[in-house]
Amino acid sequence: MQFLSDNAASVHPRVWDAMRAADAPDSPYDGDALSISLDEKMSSLFGRESKVLWVATGTAANCLALATMVQPHGGVVCHEEAHIEMDECGAPGFYLHGAKLLLAAGEGAKLTPDAIRAVLDPIRDDVHQVQPHAISITQASEYGRAYRPEEIAAIRDLADERGLSLHMDGARFGNAAAFLDLPAGEVAGAVDALSFGFVKNGGMSAEAIVFFDTALAEVALYRRKRAGHLQSKGRYLAAQVHAMLDGDLWLENARSANAAAAEIGGACADRLMHPVEANELFVRCTPEEREALRQQGFGFYDWGDDAARFVTSWNTREEDARALAKAIAGL
């Protein structure tokens, strides 16, 4: 019974079907009909003009988006536990040619305007210090917390006040949208670029960088090629994104994952370290309790010395979620 990561989940059958349907001659790279039509489909979903670039990984999506906003002498304000800081092996520094991550604190791995100001205000406006160029937030956050529209709007106002771009890491954007039950445009807010995640949500090897500041996309086209992410048969990546968007499969899958997490969370009581607002649970338990859960067949990651992380997926079986809930309740 697997709760290690939503990356471990299987690929949705409709994604496989879409890739097979794309298995016919078409223009290479991103000149095929499926790739070209992504702009219109994503613009319709978000209710604002957008330019879409597919890439194979979330790391590439985050870093290629930020590379259009940040010069090598600049910096990106992000949470101290953001994926770009903790889990991308220095990729932002590599793609951004040495630009620095400027780390802020925040409950639930979420940023607030005050937390961002605490990083920005001490920076002198002179050549001896790294100057901030962008802010990056994560929806849902690394602790499975969802930004409300008013929270994003407040960060946008601060970004505009300070002349900064705003990026959103949406590796679990679908889970945030499912929890908030709001249109995609409201869940994203007025960000300049969104790394829209599909792999964790039933895709195989396709993520989308959605540029709402479309001028940034023109720069990203060249950076994607230079970074080795312009795949010659890009229609297979585009097909995955289309499959996830068609009929709102991305939302259906995210709702299923969230429902499984809510089932488990209901049994955790005061063991929960954070409210369950997406498909991740952070649960206090001793090493002995974790071993007892593993002996019952549950796979998960330790989270420090005294907690565990459980992640549900689009295809988590109801009986597995109920079994884990019962096991945790019985500890």
Image (cartoon, grey):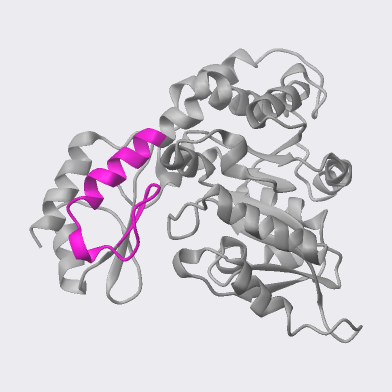
49 vs 261: above or below: above
- Establish if 44 lies above or below 213: above
In the image, 292 versus 126, the foreground residue is: 126
Q: Is residue 314 left or right of residue 212?
A: left
Residue furthest right as drawn: 127
Name the residue rendered at 7%, 58% in the picture: 330
Where residue 69 appears, as percent x and y from the top left, is: 82, 57
- Could you tell me residue 264's position as x and y percent? 23, 48
Q: Is residue 1 visible?
A: no
Q: Residue at x 15, y 45 (%)?
A: 323
With respect to residue 282, does 218 lie above or below?
above
Q: Quadrant of the rendered structure where residue 114 is?
A: bottom right
Visible residue check, residue 263: yes
In the image, taking residue 320 as reference, residue 254 lies left or right, namely: right
Towards the viewer: 320 or 79: 79
Q: Is residue 195 left or right of residue 273?
A: right
Can you say whether 145 is above or below 207 in the image? below
Please provide the residue range marked out in magenta.
255-282
Q: Quadrant of the C terminus?
A: bottom left
Magenta stretch contains residue 36: no
